[in-house]
Amino acid sequence: MKTIDSLDFSGKKALIRVDFNVPLDEQYNITDDNRIQGAAPTIKKILNDGGAVILMSHLGRPKDGPSDKFSLKHIVGHLSGVLGVDVQFASDCIGEEAFAKAAALKPGDVLLLENLRFYKEEEKGDKVFAENLAKLGDVYVNDAFGTAHRAHASTAVIAQFFPDAKYFGYLMAAEVGNAEKVLNNPQRPFTAIMGGAKVSDKLELIEALLDKVDNLIIGGGMAYTFVKARGGEIGKSLVELDKLDLANDLVKKAQEKGVNLVLPTDSQIADEFAPDSPAYDGPNDQIPADKMGLDIGKESGEHFAQVIMASNTILWNGPMGVFEMDKFAKGTKAVADAVVAATERGAFSLIGGGDSAAAVSKFGMTEHVSYVSTGGGALLEYMEGKELPGVKAINE
């Protein structure tokens, strides 16, 4: 893998694609800066070499061009603090101001460009737009694993303008390396934990994992589709009625492949989807018609924990319930506790980004697992065996 360790950046201007798509509150304060912290080592290596850095990223999904809500100017102060450098800002990512500020950079300087997605050309993978971005730097570094599955101008197309000067940043290298470790060299038993709302969102991943894992634990909203498929009563719980046959097929495939498919047996059953709703533990195939399951129950949490604790490789993607509400976070917390305990015993644990990363962060466990991915969708596609455009562009 061609990483930034293979180059001395002294006197060079590095154009780095980072993923600073961070959550902001109504006052534009960053509520989770994991992605900024993740990119910091790459940026600091280049600055310490005596290089200058030009950072490009997207933020949110602006629909109609520039918008103050999605401006990256809101993160300049925080980013300056993380890097220990007064970060400069260009109010455009191409155009005269961006070119002038990039040209004036001295060794040790950092320039952050405005949101790439203010241009529709970014998501379209427009070659001319990519070429204009490329003119800003001498070297291209991709450190944005979270967008590596998109063939956008700044993540894939731009690399062709740096045929001999394109590299993976440290974060990108770590993401790919850890995913490879789980996919291609797992210490057994290998357990995958799948949660979240829908079976359809994880279908390809589950199918791919059935050829690799020893245990597959399924929780969260998607579990009710499996319960319903075998005739259980699930009340108003989340379900994909058009995926019942598919759920039964997955159960059958797991049996044929010798995979231990572990489904929850009980739920936290609530009157309504609300943080203060009355709730009780009960069988998840006997949920009254006017109630819904919002978390796995205590029995399921203990069973899942036993399987996890006996594992040497763990992949976790998706919560066990509505963990954002403390009342329905017990199942997700039980899984997190077991993953941490297994990790402390010597297992390797990879947490797939998104809600799983948010959950371990909420419980203060980020430092107690092996690796937390910054890229939810990108990691899923990589685990499904798909080639990521952002990775392919550097390797070509």
Image (cartoon, rainbow, N blue to C red):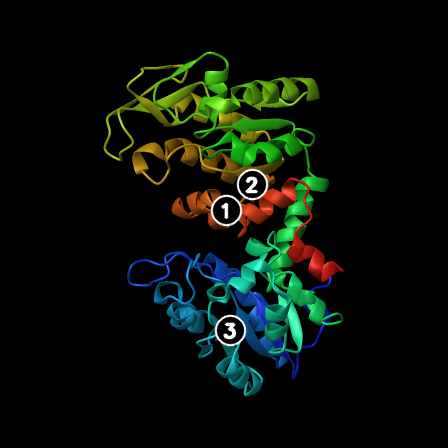
SS label for mark 1: helix
- Residue located beneath label 2 in the image: 343
Mark 3, other Cα within 10 Å: few <14 / some 14–19 / many ≥20: many
Which numbered disc covers residue 93?
A: 3
C-alpha gap between disc 3 and disc 2: 42 Å
Seen in the image, is 238 located left or right of residue 4? left
Mark 1, other Cα within 10 Å: few <14 / some 14–19 / many ≥20: some
Which quadrant of the rendered structure holds the N terminus?
bottom right
Q: Mark 2 and mark 1 in contact? Answer it, CB < 8 Å.
A: yes
Q: Residue at x 46, y 26 (%)?
A: 240
Location of residue 9 in the rendering, given as x and y in whole percent from the top left corner: 66, 77
C-alpha gap between disc 1 and disc 3: 38 Å
Q: Earlier in the sequence, mark 2 or mark 1?
A: 2
- Residue type of the residue flagged with mark 1: His
Frontmost of labels 1 and 3 is 3
Is residue 309 shown to the viewer in this render?
yes
Q: Residue at x 69, y 64 (%)?
A: 3
Which numbered disc covers residue 368?
A: 1
